[in-house]
Image: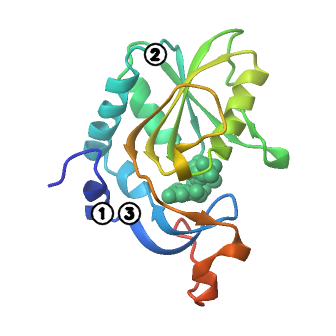
Amino acid sequence: MSTAGTLEDLREIGAYLQGHFLLTTGRHSDTFFLLARLTERPDKLVAWISLLQEQMQDIEARTVVGPAMGGIIPAYQLAALRPSNRVIFAEKGEGGKMVFRRGFQLELGEPVIIVEDAVTTGSSVNKVIDAVRDQGAHVAAVGCLVNRTQNQSVPWRVPFFSVLNVSGIQNWAPDDCPLCRQGIPLTKPKQ
Ligand SMILES: O=P(O)(O)OC[C@H]1O[C@H](OP(=O)(O)OP(=O)(O)O)[C@H](O)[C@@H]1O
Ligand SMILES: O=C(O)c1cc(=O)[nH]c(=O)[nH]1
């Protein structure tokens, strides 16, 4: 059995894929982290999230926010490891925005942690940051299972923690995609 927090652990459970993939932003990549293969296994997930909590234990927050769908289970697990934190989720609203429904509310100035499964460009997390700030709350930190950003750069200025950092994974605009030029069929692993 592989060690939590490693690429090998993800490979073993079928969460680390090679091919030609369509990403949520419309960009293409030869690598995909299908993290449902991890979140469907609570015994493994708790080991991964414990590593995240170790890094984030000094972050003061009352609420953990998980963006639907991929962030919900990791956020729930992180909140379970943080005494008296609650967990809520944000979901896709109109115009591509992330919104809080179901009566989920944040207080003015309330410190919040956002937890995602994978971060590629950071645009999804950015929308959740906007949703939290729209309610007047404060984003204390962002955490994720896998940080696969190009050049390790994200479009926000909030402390950022990840269990696994994988550098060197490229993603391309469809017009620049070398895999399209080779005629390799594009796939959507989550469908
Ligand atoms: O950093 P980004 O470039 O924004 O990409 C990462 C996002 O893409 C995936 O979500 P997706 O939109 O596929 O939705 P899901 O959570 O419902 O699976 C993933 O769960 C992240 O939220
Ligand atoms: O960028 C994405 O859409 C994305 C990448 C990835 O590796 N895993 C995922 O669920 N989404």
In this rendering, position of residue 78 left or right of residue 111: left
Given the current orientation, which residue lies at the most extreme front position? 151
Calculate the distance from the C-alpha at mark 1 to the C-alpha at mark 3: 5 Å
Query: Which quadrant holds the C terminus?
Result: bottom right
**Who's the residue at 68% across and 11% down the image?**
107
Q: Is residue 113 visible?
A: yes
Left or right placement of residue 117 versus residue 126 in this view: left
Classify 103 as above or below 2. Answer: above
Q: Secondary structure at mark 1?
A: helix
Which residue type does callout 1 highlight? Arg
Q: Which residue is mark 1?
A: 11
Q: Is mark 2 within 8 Å of ligand 1?
A: no
Tell me the residue that label 2 is attached to.
Answer: 59
In which of the image's four quarters is ligand 2 placed? bottom right
Secondary structure type for disc 3: strand
Q: Nearer the viewer, residue 37 or 157?
A: 157
User: Which quadrant of the view contains residue 183?
Assistant: bottom right
Residue 60, position in %: x, y? 48, 12
Mark 3 and mark 2: Cα distance apart in space: 29 Å
**Label 3 neighbourhood size at 10 Å, few (<14), some (14-19), many (20+)?**
some
Q: Amino acid at mark 2?
A: Ile
- The disc, 3 or 2, on the residue closer to the chain's N-terminal end is 3
Residues tagged 1 and 3 counted as in contact (Cβ below 8 A):
yes
Q: Which residue is mark 3?
A: 16
Q: Is residue 96 above or below residue 132?
A: below
Q: Give me the C-alpha separation between circle 2 and circle 1.
A: 30 Å
